Amino acid sequence: MPTLEDSIVIKATQEELFWLSQDYSKRLAWDKYLRVAELKHGLCKAGKGVEAYCESKKGIGMTVRYVSFNPPQQVAMEMTEGPWVFKKFSGSWRFKEEAEGQTRVFFRYNYQAKAGALAGLVLNPVLTWLLRTDIKNRLHYFKAAAEGKMP
């Protein structure tokens, strides 16, 4: 199962960044990839076992369940429903203080495509490129929001 990860240093505390990343009432203000981001079942706060639905501006939606929730260091989710192309999909955020007032934020995806071997030869490189781009963009959007530099 391919694992893709990138990181960025942000001028904010680990605690601030953890909660900003998991606050669905603020998610669409910084995550320019999404048009829908909501917790399911009427819940207002993310936590272990909680489900969330996110949909990209291209109309691709996914429901995930939080499998770990460890403020302010780490959070991880796994797909429960999603695009036909994925057999498995998961993601995580990690936050590591590097210096006073600066935190390195890691964003990771793990995935397995449903396609057979031949389709996987074509599909996996395309998915890898798309997901790497998504990770990089999300980290930059997140940094701009956290540092008050949103356009």
Image (tube, rainbow, N blue to C red):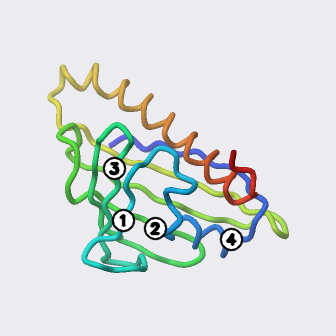
> Residue 20's spot in the image, x, y percent?
59, 68
Residue carrying label 3: 55
Neighbour tally class for label 1: few under 14, some 14-19, many 20 plus, Cα within 10 Å: many
Q: In which quarter of the image is residue 130?
A: top left
Secondary structure of residue under mark 3? strand
Q: Residue at x 23, y 42 (%)?
A: 86
Secondary structure of residue under mark 2? loop
Q: Is tag 1's residue or tag 3's residue first in the polypeptide sequence?
A: 1
Q: How far apart are marks 4 and 2 (CA)?
A: 18 Å
Residue carrying label 1: 38
Are dots 2 and 1 in contact, CB under 8 Å? yes
Q: Which residue is drawn at 40% across and 73% down?
A: 68
Q: Distance between the residues labelled 1 and 4?
A: 23 Å
Location of residue 75 with respect to 2 vertically, above or below: below
Q: How many numbered marks, from 0 up?
A: 4
Q: Is tag 3's residue or tag 4's residue first in the polypeptide sequence?
A: 4
- Kind of residue at badge 3: Glu
Q: In which quarter of the image is the C terminus?
A: top right
Q: Distance between the residues labelled 1 and 3?
A: 9 Å
Q: Distance between the residues labelled 2 and 3?
A: 13 Å
Secondary structure of residue under mark 1? strand
Secondary structure of residue under mark 4? helix
Neighbour tally class for label 3: few under 14, some 14-19, many 20 plus, Cα within 10 Å: some
Q: Which mark is residue 14?
A: 4
Q: Residue at x 67, y 56 (%)?
A: 145
- Kind of residue at badge 1: Glu
Q: Is tag 4's residue or tag 2's residue first in the polypeptide sequence?
A: 4
Q: Which residue is drawn at 58% across and 73% down?
A: 19
Location of residue 70 with respect to 98 vertically, above or below: below
